[in-house]
Amino acid sequence: MRWLAILAAFALIGAAEPPKAETPAILLKPDAVFDGVDGKAHPGWQVLVRGDLIVAVGPNLTAPAGAVVIDLAGDTLMPGMIEGHGHLFLHPYDEASWDDQVLHEPLALRTARAVAQAGRTLRAGFTTVRDLGTEGAGYADVGLKAAIDQGIVEGPRLAVATRAIVALGAYGPKGFEPGVAVPQGAEEVSGADAMQAAVRRQIAAGADWIKLYADYRLRAGEESRATLSLEEIKAAVAAAHDAGRPVAVHASTPEGMRRSIEAGVETIEHGYGGTRETFAAMAAKKIVYCPTLAASDASARYRGWDGREPAPPAVRLSLETVRLALAAGVTMCMGGDVGVYTHGENAREMELMVAAGMSPAQVLLAATSGNARWMGMSARLGAIRPGLLADLVAVAGDPTVKIEAVRDVRMVMKGGMVVGMTR
């Protein structure tokens, strides 16, 4: 088959060690290019790659002598997608509860599964992931990131948050004899000084982002409530910003969101309790919103919802919250809390964002240049422009018309190397 010949030719490119000074160019010839810049699919455009970089994009490009030409007829070529909220060390809760994963699964097992899930994520077209906490797996995400960067295992580029930080007594697992020390899914703190120390520990261990839980359930069956004080969140932000690290906050209550906004965090995750006033304040401070619609949807299905209307209140609330945020002009993150549901099914969040009122093009921009911009990666990733890294994905059809097209991945390229092709 043609694609086997292409992969064989591509394997020869990387067979010699060290790489030759003159790496053969690759000319990609799709039906259209979505460049992640203007929100349009450009028919007839092509992309030229040399080494790990994009060197040209536009119509009627000429293949240099010796170039490998990859025919992507019927496909749209787009930037590698960026998952804004994932947990590679979790797997779906209908396979094992969160408590069981934290308490009963050995770290070696969780790491092995994370390696497999990283590979699945990459081959689904997500070439970068912001992983927001190992949930009881310590600093294993730092090691996974290093293994990917060193080419030991296959996976997306990672920005990691390590252990995450919670208020003392406000996380889990719970339900054991009081006084028994039970391993927790995040690092516990109490007070501003302890918060600063935890932030510095996690950064020293390799955290690219600091993840906080501004609110949570204190006991099973209770509603979430604010758990970190404003002073504690401010202390975290100050320590993180001093070290050049941004802060992401799990916040689903109005008060947890209010404190996070006042403290000046970079992103708020979930935000189901957000109001018009809350989102207006976020927009004013340019705080990014990651609604994780797919997590709410998946959780409802685990409880027996079959996907038909009427949807459960939590699902309806999550969709309405996105509409409020869009009306306020808040920057939207594309990130679904994948790990609650299956890795490699990241596109589920994109489909739900369209269901919440965003156009397919808006969602594609959020998943490419949008996520790259607020993650501080736009100088390297997120668009198809000369000089950027050649992280590229070909999907069947036109995803600007039908967002479901992003599920039909025909080719994945990371750093100029084809890692998957199904033509």
Image: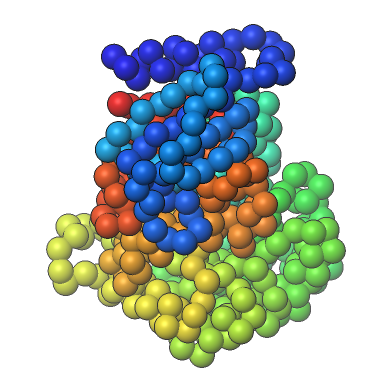
Q: Residue at x 32, y 56 (%)?
A: 400
In this rendering, would 89 be left or right of 248? Answer: left
Q: Quadrant of residue 323?
A: bottom left
In front of the other: 102 or 5: 5
Q: Position of residue 205 (x, y in %)?
A: 77, 44
Residue shown at 57%/61% (left/top)?
171
In the image, residue 366 sits, relative to residue 129, either above or below, namely below
**Where is residue 50 shown, x and y percent of the image?**
60, 29
45, 391: nearer the viewer = 45
Residue 247 left/right relative to 46: right
Vertical placement of 198 versus 391: above or below? below
- Where residue 241 sits, quadrant-wise, is bottom right
Is residue 327 visible from the viewing direction of this image?
A: yes
**Quadrant of the image occupied by residue 96:** top left
With respect to residue 34, does 16 lie above or below?
above
* Vertical arrangement, residue 239 with respect to residue 229, above or below: above
| Left or right: residue 302 compared with residue 105 | left
- Residue 39, image x, y percentages: 42, 61
Q: Count up the numbered dots.
A: 0
Q: Residue 362: horizontal and vertical position, in percent?
A: 41, 65
